[in-house]
Amino acid sequence: MRVSIVDYGVGNIAALLNMFEYIGVEAEAVSDHAGISRAEKLVLPGVGAFDRAMENLRSRGLVDPLNEAVRVRKLPVLGICLGMQLLADHSEEGEQPGLGWIEGAVVRLDPGEARLKVPHVGWSDIRPAAATVLFPVTSTPERYYFVHSYHFVCRHAADVVATISYGDDICVAVSKDNVYGVQFHPEKSHRFGMRLLTSFAGV
Amino acid sequence: MRPRLIPVLSLDSRRRVVKTVGFDTRTYIGDPFNVLRLFNEKAVDEIVVLDIDATTDGRSPDPGFIAELASECFMPLAYGGGLQDVATCETLARLGVEKFVIGSAATQPGFIAAMSRCFGAQAVVSCVDARGAGLMAQAVVRSGRQALQVSALDHAKWLQDSGCGEIILQSVDRDGARSGYDIELISTMSRSLSVPLIALGGAGGQDHLFEALAAGASASASASAFVFYGSLRAVLITYPSAEDVNRMSERLVQLQRQETQQEMA
């Protein structure tokens, strides 16, 4: 099944296309209504500031087609990094509302220890909350690459599917029904990322 | 938090990976694609590619070449050399570059702030080239040829306030020396910054990489430590094994625990 990567001017599209090609999953970048309408599965990447990303989605007329694809057609969607934060209702980083597909807010990291810097940059072992589609195996620790200054706080604990420890335990992966999100960068996380994107492609 | 170890590849104007000593004498290491592939196989944490002649030659980055480099990287890629406008960086971002290393252009008024607005602070890395040692070290630009008339420490703080998400501290004097990092400056600077500090310049092996982390660096970067082997500097691409990194990580945790206890006592 083909994966469609939403290209809205923020996010590392090439890195995702590279990795999907490497793992043998057909993938394409889509940047308009027509592209989203023919999608079977979506990836919503994103890097940078929250408001700029939402404004880009709006100005390109992508919010309605995305809502239709995710809420009505129930396509599986994976938000990555800022793309995961856009799934929330709102963010401390901006004024714009988010997509609101998973109830919660995005707040600034505040690890409370001088040696834990913000942004959090680097590799962390994640702890799956339970065996899920994104993390079917919980026995071996998986390590992912993070670059972020904000993190997702879910309204419902059941939507949290993985955490890391960064000062406090913070949520780094969410899922609810057909909506998935990860704070880290699977496309930059070697074999762990390949495993995760293969799992998502098989949803 | 795992220790972050970053190989740095310096490219010359002929796109060869070279290793400098004191920003000067160069040793040929290899073809960039071969070297990148080897690091990719070793699953390195992150990689920094610097075109060290771009600013001097007045060259802009070549998108086709960088797209090819990025397609080899299943790990984060930072690119630097000749970056001085946001539009060029937008092109590179689309091709797969995660982070932009800004050196000489960082002092252009408003450039760092504009980069940070466009890509987020986490994508904007400034490289502070420091000549001299410790708190006396001075910031220099243009491959070490021009002094900024400000201390490396003050320059780093200014870069952070301007919107950089990470600072690379590179010692010019220790470049290629393989005798260890400038621990005093790393220690002071990391305590003065809220953003991550990446130590560069001087490492010859794993012990040195550890020393910088123990002094407070968020990451240890090096060329020599990952491309040379033995006192004769035989070219060999190496990277610490997962077990080595785990040991480093445990030693760091112990050290932090001791420091916390000392502070409380």
Image (tube, grey):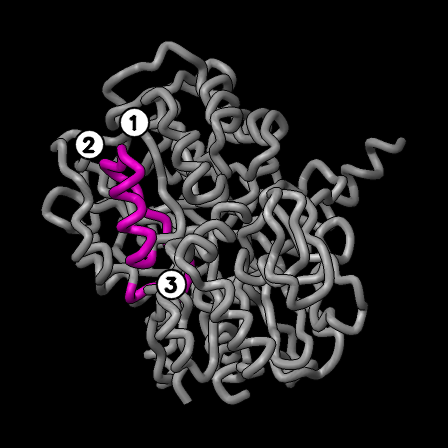
Residue type of the residue flagged with mark 2: Thr
Q: Which residue is mark 2?
A: B55
State which quadrant residue B42 falls in: bottom left
Q: CA distance from mark 2 to mark 3?
A: 32 Å
Q: Is residue A96 left or right of residue A7?
A: right
- Disc number lying in front (2 or 3): 3
The numbered disc on residue A7 is 3
Callout 3: chain: A
Residue type of the residue flagged with mark 1: Ser
- The single residue placed furthest to the top in the displayed view is B149
Give the vertical position of B154 relative to B50 (above or below).
Answer: above
Image coordinates for residue B261, horizontal then vertical, percent: 84, 38
Q: Is residue B128 left or right of residue A85?
A: left
Q: CA distance from mark 3 to mark 1?
A: 32 Å
State which quadrant residue A104 falls in: bottom right
Q: Which residue is mark 1?
A: B104
Residue type of the residue flagged with mark 3: Asp
Callout 1: chain: B
The quadrant of the picture occupied by the N terminus of chain B is bottom right
